[in-house]
Amino acid sequence: GWVSNQFLNFLSETEPSTAILLGVRPGYVARENAVILPAPEPDLTVQDSLPVGTSVIAIAVTTDDQWIQIAEPRAGWLQAGEVQFADD
């Protein structure tokens, strides 16, 4: 059967205290040089950066709405303020 995502919390393997909600949404980078991190933690090594206007595909958000996990154009995590969604 099916279960609605609103009833599920997924715990991060790299940051067990962080719960994650799944959901695919297209968006774009709203701040210059948004940094991609390997997990929703600001003190980690930066994997890459994205210029403003870059299209992204978000696949998850932390339950505190502070971090967004992206799958495209490169997998990783962005701070929520760095992403604007097309449906907002």
Image (spheres, grey):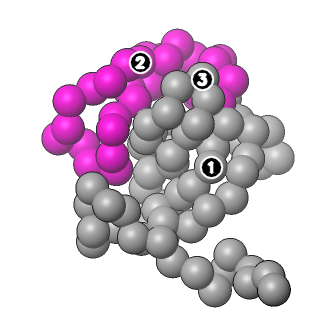
Q: Which residue, as the protein is rendered here, is positioned at the far left?
A: 43
Foreground: disc 1 or disc 2? 1
Magenta-highlighted residues = 29-56
Q: Which residue, as the protein is rendered here, is positioned at the far front?
A: 1
* Total residue callouts: 3
- Between residue 11 and residue 50, name the one nearer to us: 11
Q: In percent of the image, x 75 and y 39: which residue is there?
A: 26
- The amino acid marked with disc number 2 is Ser
- The x, y position of residue 76, in whole percent, is 44, 36
Q: CA distance from mark 1 to mark 2?
A: 18 Å
- The x, y position of residue 72, in whole percent, is 62, 29
Residue wearing tag 2: 49
Q: Which mark is residue 13?
A: none
Mark 3 or mark 2: which comes first in sequence?
2
- The x, y position of residue 83, in whole percent, is 58, 37
Q: In percent of the image, x 69 and y 24: which residue is there?
A: 55
